[in-house]
Image (tube, rainbow, N blue to C red):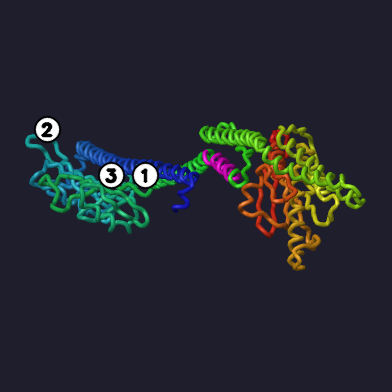
Amino acid sequence: MIRIASSLTNRIFIASTLLAVVSLGLASAFVNARVSSQAEADLRRALAEAATLVELRRENLTETFRTMARLVADIPKLKAAMADGDRATAQPVADEYRALISADLLVLTDPRGGVLGVSGTDADAMLTLGDPAVPLEEISTFLPGPRGLLEAISVPVVVLDADPPLVYGRLSVGFFMDDRLAASFKEFTGSEVAFASGGAILASSLPRDTHAVLARALNTDRPTSVTLGDEEYLALARPMPHQGRDGAAPPGDEPVMLVLRSRTERLSVLNSLRLGLAGALVITILLATLLSYFVARTVTRPLAAVTGAMADVAATGDLTRKVPVRSRAWDDEDARLLASAFNTLTESIARFQKEAAQRERLSSLGRLSTVIAHEIRNPLMIIRAALNSLRREHVSAADRLEAAADIDEETTRLNNLVTDVLDFAKPIRFELAAANLNDICRASAAAAWVGHDSSEIELDLDADMPPVVTDAERLRTALVNILTNARHAVHAAAEAHAAVSSGTGGGAVAVASRPGVIVRTRHHAGRAAITVQDFGTGISADDMVHIFDPFFTTRRKGTGLGLPIAKNIIEGLGGTITVRSTLGRGTELQLDLPLTAEATA
């Protein structure tokens, strides 16, 4: 976890993702809580409204039957049928008026409570309504029955204009609160309805096997949760008051109307909303994750490019490495500024190094007098000695030829020294043109091995090497200097090996079975590399730090300017030169050059 958090990209990505997850999660939880709370409140409000509607509808039905009973009780035809107390006369009238007012039951009784007519079934409970001692009383009551809860209304059939009033008996009508009426109320209110009395459900719009569970919700005056099968309901019980002879319901026998709303059905809509909200949350988090990763990459990709360029510079010392600076709208401005600053820094360092190298060359000229005293005096002394020997009388032909050879060798050495000093001192002017790098390597190897066994060198050249924009002649000069040093190192190692083998301390050059020098060319990412590897004497650690110092040499006949001149040429062509060496095993020099003219400049 610590390693993951150590990356700036990962930190930005993780922080942005966590911020999106936390903020969206809290928002989703808040919305879910508010929606759930609102849905629960709406459910309770809808349940209360449905209970009120059912109650009003029942009261309207009761009032309608009460009014109809009063009107029928005042009809002269009914009074005439009941006046003679004949059941045969009263029964047809009872059937007629029950059908007229659409009542489930209609009962006619005489003033003493005797039955004159019964229309409808299950009317036994209504036969005892009314008290002969209170003939003018109106009664409204509920009577439980097998079909459901029966609401019965009893009114007197009387002539009030007589003195005293003339009582013909009572008219009792009733309608059942049964399954059919519960289903009608359900269609009207969208809620399940049940009717109960005495703690038992008598009728409902739900199946009868649910009545035992529904009965548990009768004894509370607040909404109660009821589970029927795999569906949950919210139930509200409302009492249905009525008047008996004493004006109150019998104790524990008060009828109850139960209204239920499906919480499962209501919350299924909420579950759909939650599912949609969860899907939107997941999609939003994914988009936020991708966006945060993209933003992190716009910041860290340029930083990675700068870091990579720094690593390349540290590894190769090549200050021509540049970080590409893009100006796309989504790239980070600070990262662009950092890349530009890095490029400016490397350009400034490269310029300062070139200026320092130029100053070093000028400073080296100041030390030239010391070099001349050492490097020129010896050849002059040899030339003078040779001339003195020529002045002697009786000089043999062999001595004369030997003196001439010494003079020729030393003048050549002096000429080479002067040429190298002039090449090192004067500014180099390059003439850039497209050239074949492999051909330059072949020509340089041939020039460095003139007069020597060409099998000592092997060329491993890249067949796909593209043309290189460079100064071919200057590059050839640098390669000849490097290859000449490699040849001397290989020959010195061979001589040392031969001396050890013979035990004489000297001997001819021994050429190994493998090549003493290998020259390779490769190209990659707009640059070309030339590697010169020799298996010679190698360079000691103390000498390694001075190999590019002017006039530093470990060979008696060396000028110490070959590698400094090569370094000036390679750097002037926009390249770098690096050296690795192990004493006694050999040396490897790598030249890194640009392929294009812009990079060379």
Label 2 to label 3, Cα distance in Å? Answer: 29 Å
Q: Earlier in the sequence, mark 3 or mark 1?
A: 1
Identify the image quadrant of the C terminus: top right
Which percent across, then down, holds residue 432? 76, 34
Callout 1 amino acid: Ala
Q: Earlier in the sequence, mark 2 or mark 1?
A: 1
Residue 88 visible in the displayed image: no
Q: Is residue 327 left or right of residue 15?
A: right
Residue range in magenta is 299-312
Q: Residues within 10 Å of mark 3 (few under 14, many from 20)?
A: some
Q: Earlier in the sequence, mark 2 or mark 3?
A: 3
Callout 3 amino acid: Ala
Residue 103, disc: 3
Q: Residues within 10 Å of mark 1 (few under 14, many from 20)?
A: some
Q: Is residue 308 shown above or below 581? A: above
Residue 29, disc: 1
Q: Is residue 587 shown above or below 359? A: below
Q: Which residue is mark 2?
A: 161
Which percent across, then down, holds residue 234? 30, 49
Q: Which SS class for mark 1? A: helix
Q: Quadrant location of residue 471?
A: top right
Q: Are marks 2 and 1 in contact (CB under 8 Å)?
A: no
Q: Is residue 147 magenta?
A: no
Main SS category, magenta section: helix
Label 3 to label 1, Cα distance in Å? Answer: 55 Å
Q: Is residue 300 left or right of residue 586?
A: left
Q: Which SS class for mark 3? A: loop
Q: Marks 2 and 3: which is nearer the front?
A: 3
Which percent across, then down, holds residue 2? 44, 52
Q: Quadrant location of residue 419?
A: top right
- Residue name at image x 69 percent, y 51 percent: 554
